[in-house]
Image (spheres, grey):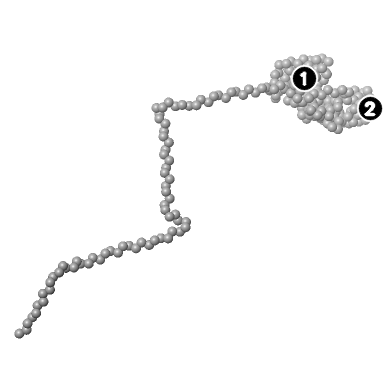
Amino acid sequence: MSVVKLHLIEEGPRPEPSVKKAKAPRVTAKRLSAQEPTSKPRKTPRKAAPKTADKTAPKTTDKVAPKAASKTKKREAMVSDVMQATVITCGPFATLNDAARLMWEHDLGALVVVNEQCKPVSMITDRDICMAAYTQGVALMHGQVASAMAKKLLTVSADASLDELTQLMAKAQVRRMPVVDEHGKLVGLVGMADLMKEAHGGQVTERKHGSTGAMMVELLGEMLAS
């Protein structure tokens, strides 16, 4: 008969079942390039909107003083305002025939005689040429302007007033007068027609017409009567 031996094993605390821990995800560090900023740029705070003025508050407006009206002083009319800037001239040694031809071509009654420096020395009219042909008994092509031109010459400055001009013309009893600059050179010619045009409302307006117009009418009457 076989004998079975039983061994008693003392039961201790049962081991707890092992729980597998979840592996943490791998974090790969990204290398930053030199151009990429290490941190995000901070946003600049927005400026607060300006507060609207209280509608109930009284409005204050700065009053702008009106500009004072500029007073432009009217200047007196000068000879340069009415003179003819284009002048037909001749030399003292030109023939009377040449002078008569210039008068005919340009429909003129007189020419200003100038020297080599373009300074007026005299004037010659169509009447002077006719009288020279009669008294000298020579053909016009053989006579010179110097033999028939006026012996005296009266000129006026370009910056002289019209009143001064009319007084000079009335005193000298001439219908036209050469205009010279500060150096005595010829710059124009002024005649009775220019003065009458100005007296009746010419292009120049910054002047007084009263005394000048009356003097020109009186001057014209004296010349026509002579």
48 is higher (above) or lower (below) than 10: above
Kind of residue sitting beneath label 2:
Val
51 is higher (above) or lower (below) than 176: below
Q: Could you tell whether 180 is left or right of 56 in the image?
A: right
Identify the residue at horizontal 90%, vertical 23% (top origin): 131
Q: Quadrant of residue 44?
A: top left
- Tag 2 near tag 1, CB within 8 Å: no
The numbered mark, 2 or 1, whose residue comes first in the sequence reads: 2
Identify the residue at horizontal 85%, vertical 29% (top origin): 114
Residue 95, position as x, y percentages in the image = 89, 30
Depth check: give the residue in front, 85 or 56: 56
The residue carrying mark 2 is 138
Depth check: give the residue in front, 103 or 66: 66
Quadrant position of the C terminus in the picture: top right
Quadrant position of the N terminus in the picture: bottom left
The residue carrying mark 1 is 164
Report, in whole angstroms, how far the alpha carbon at label 2 lies from the one at label 1: 41 Å
Kind of residue sitting beneath label 1:
Glu
Residue 157 seen in the figure: yes
